[in-house]
Amino acid sequence: MKLKYSIVLLFLLQGTVWADDSKIERVEPPFWWTGMSNPQLQLLVYGKDISVTVPELNHPGIVITGVSKVTNPNYLFVELEISKDIPPCEFEIFFKKGKSVYTSFKYELRGRKQGSSSRKSFNKSDAVYLLMPDRFSNGDTSNDNIPEMLEQCDRSDPDGRHGGDIAGIINHLNYIRDLGFTAIWSNPLVENNNPFYSYHGYAITDFYRIDPRFGTNDDYTRLVNESHKRGLKVIMDMVFNHCSIHHWLMQNLPGTDWINNNDEFYRSNFRASTITDPYASVYDRDKMLTGWFDTHMADLDQRNEFLARYLIQNTIWWIEFSGIDGIRIDTQPYSYRNFMTEWSNAIFTEYPKFNVVGETWLQQEAMTAYFQKDALNKDGYNSGIPSVTDFPMYYALNKAFNEKDGWTEGLLSLYYVLAQDFLYAHPDNNLIFCDNHDLDRYFPKVNSNIKKWKMGMGFLLTTRGIPCIYYGTELLMTGEEKKGHGSIRKDFPGGWPGDSVNAFTSAGRNKAQNEAFNYLKTLLKWRLNNKLIQYGKLKQFIPENEIYVYFRYTDDECVMVALNNSNNEMKALKPERFDECMKNYKYARNVVTGEVINYLTVLTLPPKSILILELKK
């Protein structure tokens, strides 16, 4: 199907007539910082026919080292070199046509915050709360409808904007902290000024601006600061593979090589396996990389050096501006591999202790491991991305408790995922989860059985990796992706003024919800202060007779986890088989109930249950 996009026509029809209006419409990044490890800065300058000018500046410690023109005469890319010891300042760049000054602008270099380059990031000691801002809480109803935005608020539309915002998140930071989480991952908050389906945040129209229906850039910084006051880290969601066709750059492209297949639309085949497949056809691999996600999401071509620098600098800008503690990369395999390595090298040059998790939506362990930093890839590829989303673990958790145990089914599916951790360079840094904003809610996936739900939560919070739990999981929220994304992204009850139920309070939750909430809170609070679970070693025993046992341990401490997958049979667990882990321990404490178990000779597990014991000497 041939689609002639307005973005292409605008590019083809624009002229080179000199404009009387010499205003520079945009300079990005809008400002920068002194003392960066990389002294080079690329400025994207956008204004009518700006390319016919020559930029000049005269300021100590700052020099123009290069000026690049592109096909579109309305762009210039100005390369600056900034001395590392220059103090914060403002300086002016003059754009000359011949000997006359055509226009100019002042640019600001700010001072970096003390310790910004060595800030700590999220890690395996954390438990992450994933929330969708538009669906979490509406703390400021005055920004629900903004005249300049193409889509207005309509809470009755499951795919429309509902009004959740940054103020709503800030209002409930105590709720998140008190539940036992230590980090927040929010779906993107940057501008998505699209005529429809704009609430999710993944069709960006301005990389440097928080969507005004969520708040302002300063509001986002306030969110980070208020989170830090409560001991919560903030993970920012970033998108490099695509942006909206309504992005201002797409409306007047610097050149046709900024996006893929801009003359003939086709979707990606969504087969990320083609990146790792040694036998993949060029046709299939190219279709995966260059195809669009949808007609309204232009696929970015990061092979363009100016675009690559633009995206890298945008990331550094947000880290430095807001003080975030980590990044989640959307659709990591869909961006060009070499760009992702270039991006990660640039980020960790500036922030060596930072952490990043890449969304690697793949079904097999080996393909997932390929995209993690330091993977032993035969082709030598190293993404530099420390953490990956553990989709193989997700698939196992969504079937393990519904299946009867077999050679690879049931509890064995969990066992085999962990048995393949030799493929990962850093398995403890994998982000593990039962569901998220793109997937069926976990509670209905385990047949709305709270016993199975507890098994899943107990496993998630005691195995290796960084656990991530989707908002509303603590309320047993339901939703199926096949019914539309609105089904799995429902409003948090109590997040809007006038809601009849407020699930942020115990009184607003029903009996089953409070049971789930309290169970999850108990485990999260325990994990919060438990270095053994966060950093300890893992040893697992092959599931037998519908029983799966594993241990988290150090030389001096040990936690035993046992799962009974039987639907109706009480199981007796004899410790002789596990003597290598249990022989030095005399009694135990049940982590969930607090019960002290004085005799470890025989342990019993009810059907469909998980037992978590702190072993004591």
Image (cartoon, helix red, strand yellow):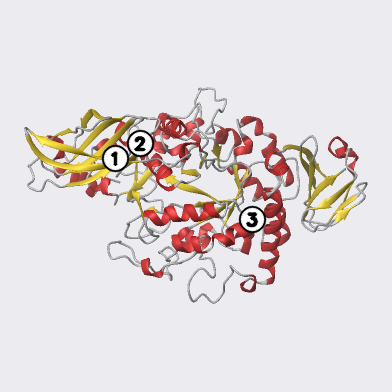
**Amino acid type of the residue that numbered disc 1 sits on in the rendered structure:** Cys
Q: Which mark is residue 89?
A: 1
Q: Position of residue 81 (x, y in %)?
A: 29, 29
Residue 69 image position (x, y, % from top left): 19, 32
Query: Closer to the camera: disc 2 or disc 1?
Result: 1
Q: Is mark 1 on a helix, strand or loop?
A: strand
The C terminus, quarter of image: top right
Q: Which of marks 1 and 3 is nearer the N terminus?
A: 1
Q: Which mark is residue 34?
A: 2
Amino acid at the residue labelled 3: Gly
Residue drawn 38% across and 55% down? 218
Residue 91 appears at what percent x and percent y? 23, 39
Q: Which of marks 2 and 3 is in front?
A: 2
Cα gap from disc 2 to disc 3, whole angstroms: 38 Å
Mark 2 or 1 closer to N-term? 2
- Considering only vertical position in the picture, is 320 above or below 305? below
Q: Is mark 2 on a helix, strand or loop?
A: loop
Whether tag 2 and tag 3 are in contact, CB under 8 A, the answer is: no
Look at mark 3 in the image and give the residue it sits on.
180
Residue at the spot x=27%, y=37% of the render?
A: 43
Q: What residue type is labelled 2?
A: Thr
Are the residues at dot 2 and dot 1 in contact (C-beta closer than 8 Å)?
A: yes
Disc 1 versus disc 3: nearer the observer: 1
Q: Do the residues labelled 1 and 3 touch (CB within 8 Å)?
A: no
Left or right of 210? Residue 479 is: right
Q: Classify 10 Å Cα crowding around label 3: few (below 14), some (14-19), many (20 and above).
A: many
- In whole angstroms, how far apart are the C-alphas of marks 1 and 3? 43 Å
Residue 238 picture location, percent across and down: 43, 45
